[in-house]
Image (cartoon, rainbow, N blue to C red):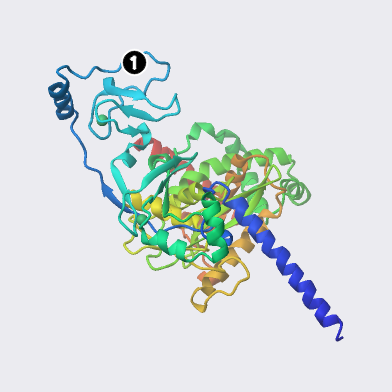
Amino acid sequence: MAIIIPLLLSIIKYLNKILFKFQCFLIHRFMSNLPSDNPIAEQYRTMQVDDFPIIEKRELLDHKVLLQQYLDTHGKPLKPINHRSSNLPPKGTTCPICNAPYEYIYDNSGGRGQLKCKVCHSTFFPHKSYLEKLVFKCPHCRHTLTKKRDRKNFFVYSCQNRKCSFYLQNIASLTPEQQADFNQNPHKYKMHYYHRVFDIELDSLKQEPNKPHSVDLSRIRKAKYVLGLALTYHINYGLSLRQTASILWDIHRIKISHQTIANYAASAARILKTYVDDYPYDLSSQVSICGDETYVKVLGKKHYVFFIMDVVKKIITSYEVFANRDGISAIKAVYATLAKFRKIPENLVLIFDSNPIYLLAQHFFAQHNIHFDVKQVIGLTNNDEVSAEYRWLKQVIERLNRTFKAVYRGKNGFNSLERANEYMVLFVAFFNFLRVHSSLNYNVPVCVPEIANMPDMPSKWLELLRLSYEHICRHQHIT
Ligand SMILES: [Zn+2]
Ligand SMILES: [Zn+2]
């Protein structure tokens, strides 16, 4: 016994080490699209998000005044651009700073999108011009941030002030060895304040509603009850497509291939999506919107389901599957939830795990004047201790994950991201409208009387589909 205990302890230590390395690997993998700027300490390298910058409106200029000044100084008018190069600015582009017309705008980056104004010399991206109208200032020293570089999905702004308290504090926190290394290899350390601005349009987050003609409804009408049965077995009971086909034959003597069921499911998802997304949910106004990510496989590769839910009313508000676990995915997931509020409540708080991508999302929306608070709870989704205040949230999230995994177990992954997202629509339609919860006194989260009046689950699915189809038709009438 005396020998075994130290041996066990050393094994546990060894396993812990492996686990830590694995966590580091995961963090690096998930955060791989973040800038590789090296923060102070290596272990926080990919996790650090600096405070939100101060944003002010930039003083705008008048091109007419500037052109007159040019004429006065040079004795001749400023010549417009001879637009003969192959990289022309998009038609109708004007300068966001001085409002100079198209004739004075030219390509400044060999076709990579950056334009320049000949009148005021501003550079800008035509679809990002709102950024040019803003000045980003360091929250620590109020120095204007310098745009350091453009990355694929965002810009990086940094405070270059060497007297900035943030910078000085970081320098002071280095050990003598780090200090020596820093003097040799300054590029390895991220000492300055920096901020990322996402290259994404708020409007681009709005999804186009489905067109009913993209769905073969006649087939569904013919199949009617069979469709309801198939969805019940496949989604409510988590049977695979093959098991569903098999049970339909064994119990109901209905001959239908698993491929036909897959087609039905895809069509149903396309009809249900608009209803699930547009439904006027009555969400809780208190602190109860909580997010968590889980994963599914698409072509054998891990993809991420961003679940956000009203944990009191058990309504899932975001459920999209993304290829990456990054800031853009977080922005899209948060957007889907915000869009489900009739009016975004004041003092809205969203609760997530400690992943910094949610802070980035918060910054993105703040930039568009949409404000909410983000509370990050360490241990919400893993085995760490979580404070008593949030333990109940952890339990709700774990229950959602269990329900999802039970339904998902019948799937051997997906062969495309589109299929994965169709599946999520079906799962959420089931979860929000059809599944009873013990914590809701065996009621469904969203009670629709027409569905509640149906005698059995297949009929409830069909009623949900009918309501969704009606909703699409109405939507098309109005728009
Ligand atoms: Zn200009
Ligand atoms: Zn600063």
Q: Is residue 79 above or below residue 313?
A: above
Question: Which sits in the foreground, 410 or 192?
Answer: 192
* Residue 40 position within the rendered picture, expressed as x and y whole percent measured from the top left: 51, 60
Name the residue furthest bottom: 2
Q: Is 220 on the left or on the right of 249, as rendered?
A: left
Question: Which sits in the foreground, 221 or 85?
Answer: 85
Using a 10 Å C-alpha cutoff, classify the residue at mark 1 as few (fewer than 14 neighbours), some (14 to 19) or many (20 or more). Answer: some
- State the quadrant of the N terminus: bottom right
Secondary structure, mark 1, is loop
Do we see residue 454 in this rendering?
no
- Residue under the point 55% across and 61% down: 178
Figure quadrant, ligand 2 = bottom left
Q: Does mark 1's beta carbon lie closer than 8 Å to ligand 1?
A: no
Quarter-of-image position of residue 121: top left
Quarter-of-image position of residue 75: top left
Do we see residue 389 in this rendering?
yes
Question: Which sits in the foreground, 315 or 188?
Answer: 188
- Residue under the point 44% across and 24% down: 110
Quarter-of-image position of residue 378: bottom right
* Residue 4 position within the rendered picture, expressed as x and y whole percent measured from the top left: 85, 81
- State the quadrant of the C terminus: top left
* Residue 140 position within the rendered picture, expressed as x and y whole percent measured from the top left: 34, 60
- Residue under the point 35% across and 32% down: 126
- Residue under the point 64% across and 63% down: 402
- Say how many tags the image has: 1
Q: Is residue 125 above or below residue 442?
A: above
* Residue 66 position within the rendered picture, expressed as x and y whole percent measured from the top left: 18, 29
Q: Mark 1 belongs to which amino acid? A: His
Q: Which residue is mark 1?
A: 83
